[in-house]
Amino acid sequence: MRLRPRHVRTRLTLWYVAALAGTLALYLGATLVFLRVSLRRDLDEGLYDAFERVEDLLEAAPDGTIRMGGHGDEDEAARFVEVWSTEGGLLYRSEALNGGVLGRAPSERSLSAPYASAVLRGGVPVRVLTRRHRIGTRDAIVRVAVSEERPQREWRDLLVGLLVGLPVATLIAGFGGHWLAGRVLRPLGDMARHAEMLTADRLDDRLPVDNPDDELGHLARVFNVALGRIQESFARLRRFTADASHELRTPLTAIRTVGEVALQEEQEPARYREAIGSMLEEVDRLTRLVGSLLILSRADSGAVLDRRELRLGELAQQAVSLLEILAEEKGQRIEVYGDPGVSVSADGLILRQALINLVDNAIKYSPRETAIRVEVRAEAGDGMVEVVDQGPGIPEAHRERIFDRFYRVDAARSREEGGTGLGLSIARWAVQAHGGRIELISDGKGSTFRVRLPAARSGAPEKEDG
Amino acid sequence: MRLLIVEDEVKVAHALQEGLEREGYKVTVAATGEDGYYLLDTRPFDLVVLDLMLPGRSGLEILATLRSRDRAIPVLILTARDAVQDRVVGLDTGADDYLVKPFAFPELAARIRALLRRGRPELVARLRVSDLELDAAARRVTRGGRDVELTLREFELLEYLMRNHRQVVSREMLARDVWKEVDRATPLDNVIDVHMARLRRKVDDAFEAKLIHTVRGVGFVVKDTKA
């Protein structure tokens, strides 16, 4: 199982510490290597100087042996010296070596790589320089060594110091990182706590934005915007629930009252029939209302469109043919104009419903003896349908909410006409489900409902906000 | 004709029983899926009206078992769910027809008649109610021997009413069967009323005996009240 710390703060600290320790270790390692190389170079340079001094001191005794001349025995450089004959016999060994050796007998190989390391009897590390030298009349091989004890000790002390210091430094940096991460994350924690306290009843609260330009300020702003939307949709839901229960209560009240009054005293059968019929009419209204609500609830959960290439003009003509008898009754003229070739990719049933609702609306709210025009055209590749009436228009105050569920300009009149107050909501949903837009243009001399449907199959439908 | 109604809602079950008995059927009511299943197993019925939402055994289960035993008895399902998926499942399981609650009683009666009639040749070309005659083949309507000029829609409307002679038809049935409008939310009631008023003017206005009647809150019926 992989261990994964629960808190972002711990994770951040661990990452930070790991990165820091890694970097430090690399850096220190490189430093140590460099130092070691440079110490040895210095030592080798000193060794060379010592060799040259020893060369001057060595002399051949009359008996053929080799000895250190002058006060050579007191010279520090002459402490570790060996002289070998070219045949491989030992000619001289300094006293300080105490009978120990500076490695095996020198060979051609040790002459080609003159510097070497060795360890004396007694554990003293030395650097050895081996070279050919002429002493008196004979060739000899001279080896001089200097102790490497001191630079090695220095280096080792440094290594120990660093090995102890690295974890300590990392630990201190870790605490610092932890503190820093906590400081950076604290506003996030504050925001989370603040958000936790928000409930459906307290959605008007907002997160404080300290600095709108930094990342946290950005987060707070985004959160606040989302909160605003939630608050809005809660408000809309509340309004909708209130409206819906009102709409349902109206026919229920009628059913109840009519039934109660009918049963108050004995009556003619005809009166009973009248009462029951009246109650059934209200049931009809309820049924229609529930049907429309069902359409919208299905719309809310996202409808699947059965798209086909359709001629917009034909669809408009169908809607008009279905309803034109109503216009006829009111002496209204209703006509479809425009380009019959305009086609869109749409779900015919759903789009037709939208057009029927718009035309029905126009017939219902236009006065007698006026004209209603349904115009189909293409605009910038988009399919357009306009339903234009010569009615009283829709006052400015109502335009904003005219597509809202149950919103009515004149509630009493609309109900009398048998409207559910959902027709335009359904129309808007149907259009938006196709990625289109529906808008109302009203200038006091009639209303125009304009539907714009994108020509190409568009991706996600616009979010419905009604 | 013996009908079985499997419906747990007592009020609805009783109303259906009473209404269908008045139409001349012998009606048995089962209040649970178990009872319904037992009755179906032990007694002969000509048709079943089956509620899908039942306590105990669900309507769909009963239907599935019934069909797996290869019983060809017609089944009409009642469902409160209006989702297309539910209807499809119901019909796939072997239902012959379905009605979504709340339904209109005349519609249920008409569906039952249609299911029981199925398989028998029925489409009579000449319909007659009192002195009103309709020739479906010739598209001709006469009353008292005189031609009545009807638009295509009015003709279809009258034909539908006369085929359901003495049976009340609801606006919903007209919307679906004459206008072929599947969606309930389509605002067709006013359209139907206007067509109906015009049809009446042409068929009944000039005559003492009215044949087309409105049943308030329910729908329309064609019948000869004197007969």
Image (cartoon, rainbow, N blue to C red):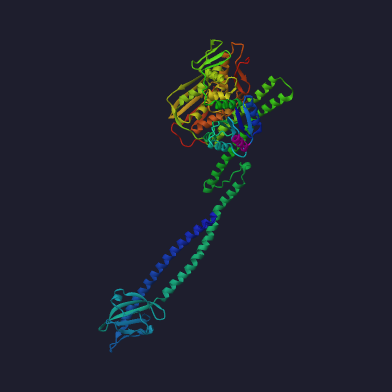
Q: Which residues are magenta?
A: B32-42
In which quadrant of the rendered view does residue A330 lie? top right
**Is A96 left, or right, of B147 in this rendering?**
left
Outermost right residue: A265
B206 versus A206 height, above or below: above
Q: Nearer the viewer, residue A399 or B51?
A: B51
- Classified by dominant secondary structure, the portion drawn in magenta counts as helix
Residue A243 percent coordinates (x, y)? 62, 32
Q: Nearer the viewer, residue B23 or A13?
A: B23
Count of picture labels:
0
Residue B166 percent coordinates (x, y)? 60, 20
Is A208 inside the magenta-drawn segment? no
Q: Nearer the viewer, residue B5 or A133?
A: B5
Residue B140 percent coordinates (x, y)? 51, 14
Residue A264 percent coordinates (x, y)? 74, 24
Q: Which quarter of the image is occupied by the C terminus of chain A?
A: top right
Is any part of residue A332 visible from this angle? no
Seen at 41% across and 68% down, the residue is A35
Is B36 inside the magenta-drawn segment? yes
B202 versus A421 height, above or below: above
In which quadrant of the rendered view does residue A98 lie? bottom left
Outermost bottom residue: A63
Is any part of residue A122 visible from this angle? yes
Q: Nearer the viewer, residue A333 or B118?
A: B118
